[in-house]
Amino acid sequence: EPTLHDLSEPLVDHAEGQLFLNEAFKIIVEDVLCKGTDVKQKVCEWKDPDELALLLDLQLRDSGEPQGRLLQRVRDVAKYSVKTTHPHFFNQQYGGVDYHSLAGRFLSEALNTNLFTYEVAPVFVLIETEVLKALRLLVGWTEGDGLFCPGGSSSNMYAMNLARYSFFPQVKRQGLCGLPQLTVFTSKESHYSVQKGAAFLGLGLDNVIVVEVDDGGRMIPEDLEEKIKLSKSQGAVPFLVSCTAGTTVQGAFDPLDSIADVCEKHKLWMHIDAAWGGSVLFSKQHKHLMKGAERANSVSWNPHKMLVAGLQCSVLLLKDTTNLLKQCHGANASYLFQQDKFYDVNLDIGDKSVQCSRKVDCVKFWLMWKAIGSSGLEERVDKAFLHVRYLVAQMKKRDGFLLLREPQFVNVCFWFIPPSLRGKEGSADYEKRLAKVAPIIKERMMKQGTMMVGYQPLGNKVNFFRMTAFSPLISNKDMDFFLNEIERLGKDL
Amino acid sequence: EPTLHDLSEPLVDHAEGQLFLNEAFKIIVEDVLCKGTDVKQKVCEWKDPDELALLLDLQLRDSGEPQGRLLQRVRDVAKYSVKTTHPHFFNQQYGGVDYHSLAGRFLSEALNTNLFTYEVAPVFVLIETEVLKALRLLVGWTEGDGLFCPGGSSSNMYAMNLARYSFFPQVKRQGLCGLPQLTVFTSKESHYSVQKGAAFLGLGLDNVIVVEVDDGGRMIPEDLEEKIKLSKSQGAVPFLVSCTAGTTVQGAFDPLDSIADVCEKHKLWMHIDAAWGGSVLFSKQHKHLMKGAERANSVSWNPHKMLVAGLQCSVLLLKDTTNLLKQCHGANASYLFQQDKFYDVNLDIGDKSVQCSRKVDCVKFWLMWKAIGSSGLEERVDKAFLHVRYLVAQMKKRDGFLLLREPQFVNVCFWFIPPSLRGKEGSADYEKRLAKVAPIIKERMMKQGTMMVGYQPLGNKVNFFRMTAFSPLISNKDMDFFLNEIERLGKDL
Ligand SMILES: Cc1ncc(COP(=O)(O)O)c(C=O)c1O
Ligand SMILES: Cc1ncc(COP(=O)(O)O)c(C=O)c1O
């Protein structure tokens, strides 16, 4: 027996719904934004997965719940979630919060539309176009194309597909079957999305040729050229160099100008993964790190990282002016991209994407940019470098902090040598014992909820901390706290 | 000369920021949610692109702007954006709003984290896992795997990559070069993301073999089998059938059981693109449309469509219990997925994805489901079917409405025959004239802002309207309005 429905009324009660939204908003402001940015509060409230699952009462049931209980759920989600907004969240490249961006995010969530046609997203099509243009100008391009993608990994994959298509347009129809073996070049310390992209696009991991880096983690152009020649001599067809501007761990910037020379000589597509480091382009003082960027064919850049635009916010920028994006990805779906519309259908930008629904990721960034201007974004970038400089100076004054090397960017990679290991550098199990230090300190900080910072091994270097300092919420006090806290947590090790 | 920065203070003023957020929230509630759901208000405020660009003052400048002007920008973005929440937005498959889901969206935006590790997303890892489990149960699977992806197109692409990997695991390392020609089968009326996916993954559009449909738009299993045999006889290797449950235009459900027989016989991966139609699984009355779904290997399903969970919200569900997702996509990045963590690293689900940053799309859906329960979701689905039934009955009572065929789902495809064309069905330019009707009516409704509904041609059928009725905000009054409005806008044609 189907329920009897009253078809003369909608199912949603707006007054009740808006009341709930209002109450939830208050909790978000109080529990996430106020508490979550307060240094006296915890960064995380660690629970074992089993215990947390019970606390959250996850199960989805047949009947609904009263509003009060639902509000308690909002509180619980807030309570047990990590406060990435917190000034002591140094764990990844997306700490902090920008209130204008957050307002833009709420706005685009409420407006809930798709960035595929001007018809349904007139404002957002124009804003996306403007933001892409402004970012391209920072790269040094007065013309070009681009797209917001759901993350830097996607942006890098897009670049790979465009590069392939630009050399072998038949790949779109015929696929790779029958084409020669195609090879991609990227540095040993590039982001793993280059590998994932090559596998996904059917190129294969073995065809990603890893180029050596110098001791700072920067691609060595001479090794690049040698490996290109070797690959050719083995019958493969090199087509793409994916360089990195700001590597994930060390924050290294590949030497773009020298790589561009190699790409020009061998006629390869030059892509720059500037997901992390692209934001230096806002800074007159630091943009030299990306010198030569304008010679690339494409650039990925994640404003959701250093610029705190909020996840997800990533762009692919292109120098191309031949509509390559649309030629490569377009499917001309007649139900969506009708050609007999009453406005200029070039504004229906969705067919440039391999997505159909595409979230609006531009308006938050635009609003934040409007709010503080390019000069405000520059100030954030410059200040981050200064915090890092201060942190490094303080480290050198203390015992037990050993840098991998001088930071090139806002990543600070270092070992904490606990008291019991100091002066034991030569001993047999030194490396083995040192490798265990970071995981223990990490466990302690999370269980106490005082701070979060990442660690990892790299090549033959055992576990070290990588902290990133760039949030607009930090000050030098937080740098001092960071060092004190590492010392406190590791003093008995 | 670098600016002098005060390094002892953060750059963000929380009081000012939170005040802005509060004011912006009020505008969102008033201008988007109240006005945007009020039938007496406009669905859209049409402006030509040039005029709109001027009104919005898009340009990004060096200096920031005062709060008052920024709030006006929030108002402008709201004003000139399409109100997809409006009960008279019938344009696409994402109209309406759910307040609990929206609260969940604000919450996850504020908590701004990444769904890659339990470390940074403890609550969300558990919620994602629970939601996927609950959805799999509706498909009929007590075990399995899955992932939230940035849209149905991505989910479909994932399925394609998994299918390929399951038959040819060497593709991950070696790529497609050297493999036989692989072929994919999908119906003529399937979504274009199957094509885009095949191009992106290096399979090629020519290797997507289009299967004929019956007059309702459903794949014909006999034609599928014939085409599989033909493809084999031509030396290709069929590996995937991508069926559709709820096609984009006609809302057709492919006959899953018969297709499963063919897939079993030929040992092919069976994927169901249920991005649009999957939600019938909540309804005891209508889930028969997906009979046989449990025999598939994978299912895509977009709660951001019929269930109004908000963009983006799409899942890929898998029957697989062998960790195929991680094997196929994993890169084991040591900086993120360290194996020496102090908790069970199987909770670090990010390596199942080809993304690195992955937005939290689950909590909004979970909160909405908690709020109204499975029975509430069922009621929404059932009620949508009843509104469609009512609409169709009313159409039949009026002159000038001609259905393509009886709706199978909540898509209603029809021509409006304007007075001047009635009874002229035999005349020479009838089709040509009829093709122009929908674009003109569409232009008029948008310029007046009264309503939005899509149109498109299909095969040899000229432009017809496709309206979708499923928003929890609609009632039969809106169905009457819809018909009256089409008549009003087209009465002089
Ligand atoms: C250098 C670099 N490239 C690409 C990415 C991937 O970006 P996303 O996480 O948005 O996919 C990252 C993420 O950390 C990165 O550091
Ligand atoms: C049947 C079908 N599959 C897939 C998609 C693509 O989903 P998304 O827009 O989330 O990429 C759509 C979108 O309209 C669809 O109707």
Image (tube, coloured by chain):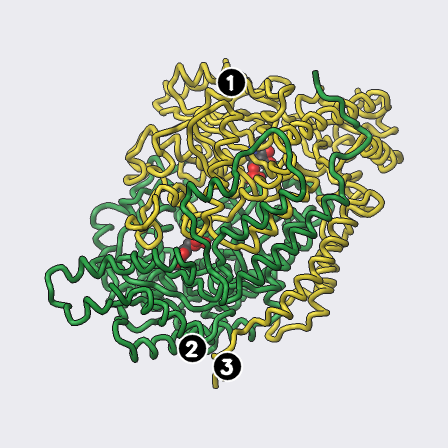
Chain colours: A yellow, B green
Of residues A423 and A275, the one nearer the viewer is A275
- The answer to whether mark 3 and mark 2 are in CB contact below 8 A is no
Same chain letter for marks 3 and 2: no
Q: Which mark is first along the chain, 3 or 1?
A: 3
Residue farthest toward the bottom in the current orientation of the protein: A1
Specify whether disc 1 shares its chain with disc 3: yes
Identify the subunit bearing mark 2: B
Q: Which residue is mark 3?
A: A6
Of tags 3 and 2, which is closer to the observer? 3
Answer few, some or many: residues within 10 Å of disc 1's Cα (few below 14, many 20 plus, some between 14 and 19): some
Residue B372 makes an appearance in the image:
yes
- Check disc 1 and report the residue beneath it: A292
In the image: residue A80, left or right of residue A342? right
Query: Ligand 1 closer than 8 Å to the CB at disc 1?
Result: no
Q: Which residue is under mark 2?
A: B386
Rendered view: B143 above or below A273:
below
Q: CA distance from mark 3 to mark 2?
A: 10 Å
At which x and y percent is residue B370?
Answer: 63, 68
- Closer to us: A459 or B399: B399
